[in-house]
Each structure stands twice: as C-alpha cells, then as structure tokens.
Image: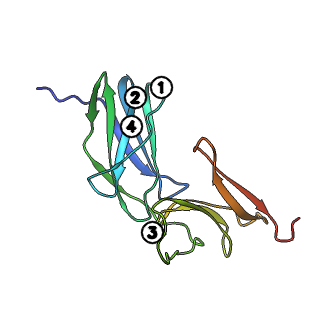
Amino acid sequence: DEEVELAKQIEAAVSEAVSTVVIVTWVTDDPTIGYVEFGATEELGTVTPLPSEASTEHRAVLLGMTPQTDCYYRVVTMDGEDLVASDIGVITTGTPPGGVPALEVVGSGHDRYTIIPMLGQGKAIAIINAQGEYVWYHVVDSAVELDMYRARLSNDGKSLLYNAGSVSGD
C-alpha cells in the first residue's frame, strides 16, 4: 500500500491582525477542494467551510480559538471521492492586545458566541464565547473619536458590521 499525500507545504501561522485566529495554507499538485479540521485538543471537532472552486493553492482561516491555547489542526483534501488527511499539527494562539479588558461571566446563559462593542480605555469590537473568552476582536485606532455602539454579523455571515457615533450625537 502506497500512502497517498495530496497536501504539501502545510503551514500554520497566527494572524498578525487577530492573535486568536490561525491561518493554514497548503499546496496540491492538481486542483482540489479541501478543508481543515481543528480544535483545542487532538479530537479536533471543528471544520472550516468548503471552498466553492478547486485550486492548487489553499488557505483556511480557523476561527473560534481562545487566547494562548494550543490549536490542533489537519488538512483534509478530496481525491475524487476519497478524503485524504494530513498528520495533525499544533500551533499556539497569541494574547489579545493591551487595552482589551478581561471579562467575567456571571450566571448562565446560552452556549453560543456573542458580538460586543467595547468602550472605555480602548475601543474594540469583539466576539466572545459562552465562557467569556475572546475568539475574535478588532481594536479601533485611538485617533478615531467615535464610539462603537452596535455590532452585528452580516446576512451572509462573512463580515462584521458596526456603527459608531459620538456621545453628543455629532
């Protein structure tokens, strides 16, 4: 039996913009469709969306990881009707930037993600998990004089929209 290896040059890096986001890239000899399985343990448990078109250069964005957590991942590529998986790799996510406050969960609620605008020392939009941990954030430049009051996911789920205004209503 010859071991099939479709994914080559597999690389994972923590995003420079958001330290809880991991970007996985890989190359295949022929155009294929593939995805990444990932999670905080070797059990994985989360899957990235399938791309709509086959390619030889692949990129997957891993969302939902928390700060300073090991992120286990493996690339899965479709070879016709067969799935071929790479070995499991691991990378550690970074820390949120300064100015993003520590959060504390009080009581119980849902088990989903929450999008929140943050005001105070720093200005940011964040996505937190049910345990009150950051999984994504966008820190707004301190030179911006407006405050963010609302944040929502776009209808297609691919963007985060927020509105800003001044306290005086200007």
Where residue 167 appears, as percent x and y from the top left, is 82, 71
Q: Which residue is mark 2?
A: 33
Q: Which residue is mark 1?
A: 53
User: What's the CA distance linking mark 3 and mark 4?
Assistant: 27 Å
- Marks 1/2 in contact by CB < 8 Å: the verdict is yes
First in sequence: mark 3 or mark 1? Answer: 1
Where residue 165 appears, as percent x and y from the top left, is 80, 63
Task: Report the number of discs.
Answer: 4
User: What's the CA distance linking mark 2 and mark 3?
Assistant: 34 Å
In the structure shown, which secondary structural element does the residue marked by tag 4 occupy? strand
Where residue 49 appears, as percent x and y from the top left, is 45, 39
Q: Amino acid at mark 3?
A: Gln
Q: Amino acid at mark 2?
A: Ile
Where residue 99 appears, as percent x and y from the top left, is 60, 72
Name the residue located 33 percent from the left edge and 32 percent from the top edge: 77
- Marks 1/4 in contact by CB < 8 Å: the verdict is no
